[in-house]
Amino acid sequence: MKKLIKTFVLLLSVSLLSVTASSEAYETTCAPAIEEPVYEEYEEAILPSSTTTISIESASEAPSIVADSSATGFRTMWDLYQYWYEKKPDGNQYPEYVCGVWSTDGGMEILTVAVTKDEKGEAGKQEILELIENDSSVTFTYASYSFAELSAVRDEILPLMGDDTGIFGLGINEMENCVHIDINTENPNSEAIIKKFTAGYGDMVKVEVSEGYTITMEETSYDIGGGDVVTEAGAVITTGTVETKSYDEVIIFCVIAVFVILLIGVSAIGIRYIRVRGTTAGNINEETVLTKKDTEELVKNSLEEPSSEVLSSVMKKIDE
Amino acid sequence: MTNNELSNRLSELKNGDKTAFEEIYRDISACAYTVAYRITGDRHLSEDILQDFFVKLYKNPPAEELENPKAYLMRMVHNITVDYLKKQVPNSDISDNEAVVSGQTEQSDEKMDIACALKRLDSDERKIVTLHLNAGFKFREISGIISMPLGTVLWKYRRAIGKLRNYLNGGEK
């Protein structure tokens, strides 16, 4: 009997661990920002393979590459950029003197790096030139605020997002060297918030106003710039060890475990939009609530057809 | 048509094979036209672009075998479209062209809805959505094509899909 109980406890621990794993997976798959192919590609492009959700604090604690002895041997700026995001062992952000990085030539051959307008920025510039072999793969510009500073401002604003404030978009614009905020002016608090932001942060923030856009639970994920994505939705539970002191304790533990599992399930359903599909697939009608995936599918499948004369006209032209 | 099949048809084009050409036309004309139309917002101009594209393709088919022929062809369409727009009035935009939507009365409600929803996007957003969803480009490639940082492309795409979804769900008519 004792053996049976032990086996049961073992199975339950495994199931709890898998629930934890699935709750982490929920953060990355159920939250729509990551559910979409866009973020799969996003991760593939930028995020380190072992990390899917990045701590907000990491942005403000962006370490410098000065002390990083492993940061050597980069052929181009693009390689160094990838290193900052994918391979750097102690973080996944720019060094503290970097304000932003973007493409200059429309491809990845030449990148522009904005550095801070101070000694640190100058030193960083030299450091980058020493690190990369091909100096022509980078151009430099100066900006007022480092990415880490902008990240800190963004993190301060992040908790304010939602229907109460009317803020429905937030991100760092590296080229403009500011935190970009989208705000719905129909919200009664929006005017006060815009004033507060412009007075408090000055040119560190840029507020874009629009009317009638509201945030939904499914949309509460934020591009935190530089390739990081923070999602608000997603439950986190912790696992603990269970001692098999008595049969009663096991029963209580089982009941709690089942309750926790049910709670997570219900929360997951609550957080997600309830999709009510119409009878005809793809139709947009009053009863259908479209998810992002549905919207993408609709746009994808709504191809425009050229008139039939185009082919005959083309054939005529190639015969000439 | 798979990428392999498309690649084979393009190889046959080097010998002036018109049957292969027609097959390519049937396979990608709608997609190419959609990309041109959603960027220009003008049906006639988009048909001119389509004609120009296919004539160029027939006369100068790709010399080497392509890994991703569809992306190559869509990039060609995009480049021709941009060239046409440069010759036209600057800042040509669907949102300025009411005729685009009103001319679609015979189309299905669904298409009308999507056309109206797309009209709500600004030109960058519409271009990103079209290049990703209709032309099948990856965001990294779009970032290169339209000279915009990857983060901005993703940000704008996300915002655009949010706007489309909001509109299609009846949030903002």
Image (spheres, coloured by chain):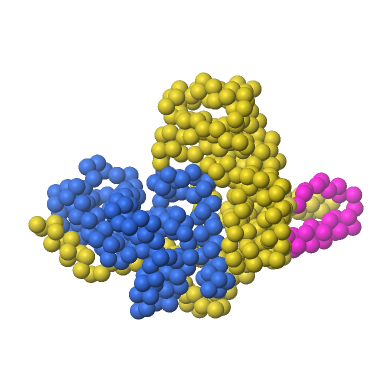
Residue A168 in picture, x, y percent from top left: 63, 59
* Count of numbered labels shown in the rendering: 0
- In the rendered structure, the answer to whether residue A201 lies left or right of residue A103 reads right
- Note whether residue B2 is visible: no
Which residues, given as a range, are shown in magenta?
Answer: A237-264
In the figure, the shade used to draw chain B is blue
- Note whether residue A63 is visible: yes
Frontmost residue, A290 versus B98: B98
- In the rendered structure, the answer to whether residue A72 lies left or right of residue A316 reads right
- In the rendered structure, the answer to whether residue A106 lies left or right of residue A274 reads left
Residue A271 in picture, x, y percent from top left: 68, 63
The letter of the yellow chain is A
Residue B57 in picture, x, y percent from top left: 22, 51
Residue A252 falls within the magenta-colored stretch: yes
Q: Residue at x 45, y 65 (%)?
A: B118
**Magenta portion: prevailing SS class:** helix
Vertical order, B122 against A202 (above or below): below
Residue A254 in picture, x, y percent from top left: 81, 58
Residue A98 falls within the magenta-colored stretch: no
Vertical order, A10 against B171 (above or below): above
Frontmost residue, A127 versus A80: A127
- In the rendered structure, the answer to whether residue A319 lies left or right of residue B72 reads left
Location of the N terminus of chain B by quadrant is bottom left
Q: Residue at x 34, y 67 (%)?
A: A304
Q: Residue at x 43, y 29 (%)?
A: A137
Vertical order, B30 against A125 (above or below): below
Vertical order, B166 against A108 (above or below): below
Q: Furthest residue to the left?
A: A320
Q: Residue at x 33, y 57 (%)?
A: B89
